[in-house]
Image (spheres, rainbow, N blue to C red):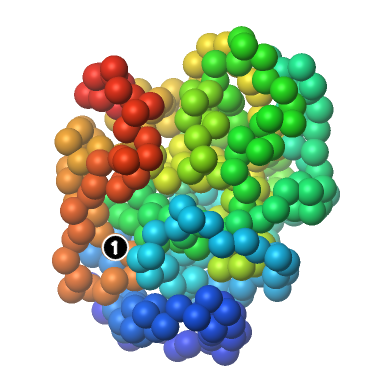
């Protein structure tokens, strides 16, 4: 049995968070942060958050971040948890491995290729993207299919703002995404368990929805590698595995594209992967989730339909049987 003391608080981390909190004047969160720090030792049924790999916040502040009306007013999860409790199989198995192995990945130079059913295929470099598209803060509820959740202050741009530049045609019914493939930088890709690169896809209307963003940062700074630097998808009403990291390719397609977890275990991970408390994962319930950073004795929270975004997205699935299309 593992019982740990609360982590010593690193000066570097305090600075980043206090800066952030002061800037947002987000007084409420202070109580949440100390409660989170006290309870961060042990996460029942899961690997403890990586305490050895102390999260050093990315020094690069993203300038001129706009506020977004789409943010939840829930208090964000502590930076430490968001950046040490990750899923990123290319950087290792287990929640703490991605933070430990983060340095393997180089995120400059970085280009995204856009191709497929569009009139203006092309590419865009990350620096271009960061300067040409206004960056917004979106504080979103985030829900992993493994029944845990966080609240994450992302920075990014609506996916549709980027997609429109490439002029998708009427044949574009889906959008497919791919992560970088480079086993030298992503040691997990030396394993034959997955069919690399990691791939995901959205239906066109999901991709063009105002809530769907490409995230370039969190807590006002550029993304740490373990969270999918330099750019990753965030679809807040879907389970986390749809939110593909470290994207290098986007393709408009006529047919539903392959998606990594769906290919691997189609009975467990559907293509839609909408957060749905009424459809259990075959091996566990999806009715509740554990709140990362809430502490050892905190009660689980009930999971809401579409992760709480039903008013905004339920209409996309009006005529669909969500038990069949899970
Ligand atoms: N390329 C890639 N993207 C990925 C994953 C991955 O293993 N590889 N894991 C997914 C899963 S299962 C989740 S829950 C989220 C986790 O994002 P976070 O670590 O930033 O919280 O990333 C998703 N995107
Ligand atoms: Mo996940």
Q: How crowded is mark 1: few (under 14 residues within 10 Å), some or many (20 or more)?
A: many
Residue 36, given in percent of the width and then of the height, sits at: 34, 77
The residue indicated by pointer 1 is 291
Residue at 25% across, 41% down: 305
Where on the picture, by quarter, is residue 217?
bottom right
In the figure, is residue 97 to the left or right of 143?
A: right
Quadrant of the rendered image containing residue 5: bottom left
Q: Can residue 164 be seen in this view?
A: yes
Left or right? Give the position of 304 relative to 229: left
Q: Which quadrant, please, contains the C terminus?
A: top left
Residue 183, image x, y percentages: 68, 41
Residue 69 to residue 197: above or below: below
Residue in the image at 53% along x and 31% along y: 207
The spot of residue 34 in percent (x, y) is: 36, 85
User: Residue 297 in the image: x percent, y percent?
Assistant: 18, 73
Mark 1 lies within 8 Å of ligand 1 (Cβ measured): no
Q: Vertically, is 197 above or below 263?
A: below
Residue 93 visible within the image: no
Image position of 28 with respect to 125: above or below = below
Quadrant of image for the N terminus? bottom left
Q: Is mark 1 on a helix, strand or loop?
A: strand
């Amino acid at each position: 049995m593992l019982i740990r003391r609360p982590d010593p608080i690193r000066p570097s981390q305090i600075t980043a968070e206090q800066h952030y909190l002061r800037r947002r004047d987000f007084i409420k969160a202070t109580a949440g942060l100390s409660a989170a720090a006290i309870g961060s030792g042990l996460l029942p049924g899961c690997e403890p958050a990586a305490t050895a790999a102390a999260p050093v916040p990315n020094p690069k502040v993203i300038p001129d971040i706009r506020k977004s009306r789409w943010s939840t007013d829930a208090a964000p999860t502590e930076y430490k948890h968001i950046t040490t409790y990750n899923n990123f199989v290319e950087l290792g198995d287990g929640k703490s491995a991605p933070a430990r192995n983060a340095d393997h990945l180089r995120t400059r130079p970085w280009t995204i290729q856009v191709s497929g059913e569009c009139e203006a295929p092309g590419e865009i470099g990350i620096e271009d993207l960061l300067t040409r598209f206004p960056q917004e803060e979106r504080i979103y509820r985030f829900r992993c299919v493994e029944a845990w959740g966080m609240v994450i202050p992302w920075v990014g741009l609506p996916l549709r703002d980027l997609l429109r530049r490439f002029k998708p045609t009427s044949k574009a019914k889906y959008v497919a995404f791919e992560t970088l493939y480079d086993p030298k930088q992503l040691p997990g890709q030396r394993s034959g368990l997955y069919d690399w690169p990691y791939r995901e896809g959205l239906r066109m209307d999901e991709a063009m929805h105002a809530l769907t963003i490409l995230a370039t940062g969190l807590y006002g700074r550029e993304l740490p590698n373990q969270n999918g630097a330099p750019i990753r998808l965030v679809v807040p009403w879907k389970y986390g595995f749809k939110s593909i990291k470290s994207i290098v390719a986007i393709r408009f397609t006529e047919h539903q594209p392959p998606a990594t977890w769906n290919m691997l275990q189609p009975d467990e991970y559907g293509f839609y992967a909408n957060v749905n408390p009424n459809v259990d994962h075959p091996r566990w319930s999806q009715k509740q989730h554990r709140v990362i950073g809430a502490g050892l004795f905190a009660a689980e929270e009930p999971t809401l339909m579409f992760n709480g975004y039903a008013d905004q997205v339920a209409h996309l699935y009006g005529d669909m049987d969500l038990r069949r299309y899970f």
